[in-house]
Amino acid sequence: MVYTTCESACPIIVGLMQRIEAALPPEPCPHVGFVLVTVEPARDTPGVLSAYSARMHLDLLSWWLLSGHPDDVLELATLLGITYKRDQSGGFIHSHVITVLHKAGEMVHRHEGLQQDMASTLEAMRRAVQD
C-alpha cells in the first residue's frame, strides 16, 4: 500500500517489487501480478495512478494500481496488517510491507521493512505459483 506523492518509502517499496518482478523466471510471470493500493484515494484518482505507473515504469500487463472508498482501503489494510495515518505535513506514516497472496487470496508471506534482501519473498512467490 502506497500513495503517489510519497517521496520516501513508497518509491523504495515499488523499487523492491520491481526487483522481485525482474528476478522471477519467465515461467510464472503470466501467473504473477503486482498490486499497489493507494492509502490516499481522494488524491490518487485513476488519472493520477495512471501517471504514477508511467513515471515508475510499471508494465500495466502485470501491475494494477487500485483505489477505493476510504473505508474499503482501511479494511484491506487491516486485513493485511498494514497501518497508516496522516502526518502533520499532509503525507502518511505507514507500514512498509510487501504481501504475497496465493491465487485464492490467502496471505502466504509478508516482507516487512525496506530491507533489500528479497530471497524469502521470491521463494514464497515461487511456492505460491506452484500450488
Image (spheres, rainbow, N blue to C red):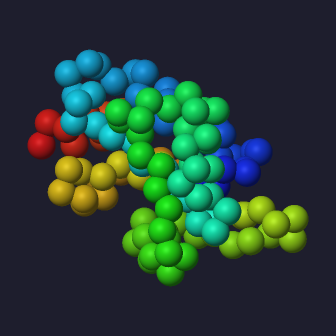
Which residue, as the protein is rendered here, is positioned at the far left? 131
Quadrant location of residue 127? top left
Q: Is residue 69 left or right of residue 7?
A: left
Question: Residue 123 versus residue 6: which sits nearer the camera?
Answer: 6
Pinpoint residue 13: horizontal percent, then vertical percent.
Answer: 59, 42
Which residue, as the protein is rendered here, is positioned at the far front? 47
Quadrant location of residue 70? bottom right
Question: Residue 43 versus residue 29: which sits nearer the camera?
Answer: 43
Q: Is residue 104 left or right of residue 89?
A: left
Q: Is residue 120 visible?
A: no
Q: Is residue 66 above or below residue 51?
A: below
Question: Residue 95 versus residue 22: which sits nearer the camera?
Answer: 22
Pinpoint residue 126: horizontal percent, then vertical percent.
Answer: 25, 33
Q: Is residue 114 above or below residue 106?
A: above
Pinpoint residue 62: horizontal percent, then vertical percent.
Answer: 36, 35
Pinpoint residue 18: horizontal percent, then vertical percent.
Answer: 50, 30
**Which quarter of the rendering shows the C terminus?**
top left
Q: Is residue 10 above or below residue 93?
A: above
Q: Is residue 89 left or right of residue 80?
A: right
Q: How many marks?
A: 0
Q: Is residue 124 left or right of residue 75?
A: left
Q: Is residue 83 visible?
A: yes
Which residue, as the protein is rendered here, is positioned at the far top? 26
* Residue at image location 35% in from the left, 33% down from the top: 61
* Residue at image location 62% in from the left, 50% down from the top: 48
**Which quarter of the rendering shows the N terminus?**
bottom right
Which residue, as the protein is rendered here, is positioned at the far bottom? 71
